[in-house]
Image (spheres, rainbow, N blue to C red):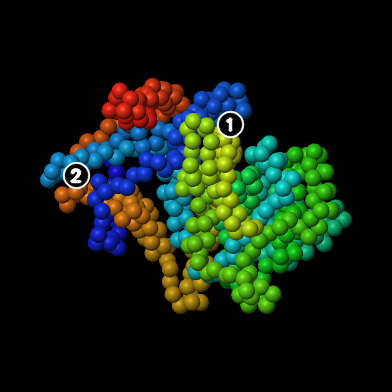
């Protein structure tokens, strides 16, 4: 049953009732495109040309908000008007469900972040490297590790120079224990914090894996038990270290086949791989650059693409069911102009499904004192910073703030805040009450067999009707 409580006090006075729903039947919808090309998805899955997770997410999306997953019934105690709320699919490929699951991790990260300036850093890779991650998607984990090692190195330059002198004869910069994660076993290493997310696409939906990292401009010294500011990010060291770590880890992953890629990268990108970082306001060379202190905005932007499909449904312009062609748009980064793309719908689907992450792959990861295993260390940092700024933000207060924000993501409150509509408010002015629940999954697993059976039944009911004026009063289209 859905939660009927309202978790907000900032509701407008002119809330609309549940029947005031402005539905546009001519608006192109992603579900329509998926229904028309479902046989293609099945064929791709049976021939092994698509990963199993693709068909699973498509099936879940098609059955979202349908009777196949069950529903709850609410009835008005005054006039008897009924409202049915269907269950959701909870798929990251669904344009409806993914909105909530984008906001939830953003709230958790926002309430965790320290009360200090954070730097938004974007780690990119050369275009010729991208195909390697398409062939072996497990290599995407190495991008997280390389970004983590890069930040660890620039925050521990003294240890890096010491280890480099010690191991100059062997040519190795890592010991055996820290071959993958840099300086993980050094007790005197400075502790940094980082929240990293991976984005595998750009605005034009091309395959372009890159890492977005949110790094606080502060480090923790475990030896002296104090916090230190860390505002200066050496861009030369940042780019070259990122290049070295990516090449080193990919060489471990692909072996000798990767050596030509690494050699070309050191020749063509002699200044290192491109890394974008927000500039400080007092930098004379970049004083005209924008600089944001909005941590919540940065977190929301980074989480937005970690839990939702590659393209929002609002970017669809039109869809022709006869020719199976679709028109959509994107805003080009370089020209800042809107580009309209008209192509077969199957080409758009090919671009979108490659960005569906594998089962169990975590698109958001926490490092340093933001890691879940370092809770005690984070609490100590909060205590030290509270003493400096003469204000406290203890664990209980942060947990209460996190729960209050998460409650606002409940269905009724979220719809009120977003659409100015109360889904339980009847036209007569009374609040509907819960009456019944239908659960077809009782004792049944929502697996591929069940979903396929439901899809077959739904497709049988999608019978074409005769348009009005041609012998039948039934409206044209499909049901």
Rate crowding at label 2 as few (under 14), some (14 to 19) or many (20 or more) other CA atoms within 10 Å. Answer: some
Task: Report which residue position mark 2 lands on.
Answer: 433
Q: Farthest residue in the left direction?
A: 78
Mark earlier in primary sequence (2, 1): 1
Q: Which residue is painted at 81% across and 58% down in the image?
A: 270
Query: Where's residue 473, x and y in %?
Result: 28, 28
Whether 177 is drawn above or below 87: the answer is below
Q: For marks 2 and 1, give the CA distance.
A: 43 Å
45 relative position to 18: left or right = right
Image quadrant in which the N terminus is located: top left
Image quadrant in which the C terminus is located: top left
Rate crowding at label 1 as few (under 14), some (14 to 19) or many (20 or more) other CA atoms within 10 Å. Answer: some
Whether 462 is drawn above or below 382: the answer is above
Closer to the camera, 185 or 407?
A: 407
Task: Judge whether residue 21 can be spotted in this image.
Answer: yes
Task: Report which residue position mark 1 lands on.
Answer: 51
Q: Which residue is painted at 49% across and 28% down in the image?
A: 38
Whether 151 is drawn above or below 478: the answer is below
Query: Where's residue 466, x and y in %?
Result: 35, 25
Q: Which residue is painted at 78% across and 60% down in the image?
A: 271
377 relative position to 433: left or right = right
Q: Which residue is painted at 30% across and 50% down in the image?
A: 412
The reply to whether callout 2 and callout 1 are in contact (CB within 8 Å) is no
262 relative position to 463: left or right = right
Closer to the camera, 302 or 335?
A: 335
Task: Judge whether residue 213 can be spotted in this image.
Answer: no
Query: Where's residue 7, x and y in %?
Result: 30, 56
Closer to the camera, 273 or 155?
A: 273
Quarter of the figure with residue 50: top right
Closer to the camera, 241 or 37?
A: 37
Query: Where's residue 259, x and y in %?
Result: 82, 43
């Amino acid at each position: 049953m859905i939660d009927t409580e309202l978790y907000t006090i900032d509701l407008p006075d002119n809330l609309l009732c549940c029947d005031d729903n402005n539905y546009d039947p001519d608006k192109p919808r992603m579900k329509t495109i998926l229904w028309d090309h479902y046989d293609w998805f099945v064929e791709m899955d049976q021939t092994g040309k698509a990963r199993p997770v693709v068909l699973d997410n498509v099936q879940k999306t098609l059955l979202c908000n349908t009777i196949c997953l069950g529903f709850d019934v609410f009835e008005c105690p005054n006039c008897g008007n009924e409202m049915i709320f269907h269950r959701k699919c909870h798929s990251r490929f669904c344009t409806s469900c993914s909105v909530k699951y984008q906001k939830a991790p953003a709230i958790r990260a926002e309430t965790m972040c320290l009360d200090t300036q954070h730097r938004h850093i974007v780690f990119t890779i050369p275009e010729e490297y991208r195909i390697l991650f398409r062939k072996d998607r497990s290599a995407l984990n190495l991008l997280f590790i390389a970004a983590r090692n890069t930040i660890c190195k620039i925050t521990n330059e003294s240890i890096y120079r010491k280890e480099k002198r010690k191991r100059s004869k062997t040519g190795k910069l890592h010991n055996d224990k820290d071959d993958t994660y840099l300086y993980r076993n050094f007790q005197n290493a400075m502790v940094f914090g980082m929240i990293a997310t991976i984005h595998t696409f750009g605005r034009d939906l091309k395959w372009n894996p890159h890492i977005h990292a949110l790094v606080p401009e502060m480090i923790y010294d475990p030896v002296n038990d104090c916090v230190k500011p860390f505002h200066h990010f050496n861009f030369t060291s940042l780019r070259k270290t990122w290049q070295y770590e990516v090449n080193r880890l990919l060489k471990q992953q692909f072996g000798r086949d990767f050596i030509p890629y690494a050699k070309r990268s050191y020749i063509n990108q002699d200044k290192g791989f491109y890394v974008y970082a927000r500039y400080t306001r007092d930098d004379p060379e970049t004083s005209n650059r924008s600089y944001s202190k909005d941590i919540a905005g940065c977190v929301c932007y980074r989480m937005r693409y970690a839990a939702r499909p590659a393209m929002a449904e609002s970017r669809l312009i039109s869809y022709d069911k006869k020719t199976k062609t679709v028109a959509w748009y994107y805003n080009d980064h370089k020209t800042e102009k809107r580009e309209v793309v008209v192509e077969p719908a199957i080409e758009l689907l090919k671009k979108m499904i490659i960005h569906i992450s594998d089962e169990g792959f975590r698109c958001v990861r926490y490092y340093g004192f933001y890691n879940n295993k370092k809770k005690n260390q984070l609490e100590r940092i909060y205590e030290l910073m509270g003493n400096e700024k003469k204000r406290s933000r203890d664990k209980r207060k942060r947990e209460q703030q996190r729960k209050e924000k998460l409650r606002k993501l409940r269905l009724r409150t979220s719809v009120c805040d977003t659409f100015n509509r109360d889904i339980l408010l009847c036209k007569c002015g009374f609040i509907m009450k819960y009456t019944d629940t239908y659960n077809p999954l009782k004792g049944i697993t929502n697996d591929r067999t069940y979903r396929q059976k439901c899809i077959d039944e739904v497709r049988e009911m999608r019978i074409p009707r005769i348009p009005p004026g041609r012998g039948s009063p039934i409206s044209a289209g499909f049901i």
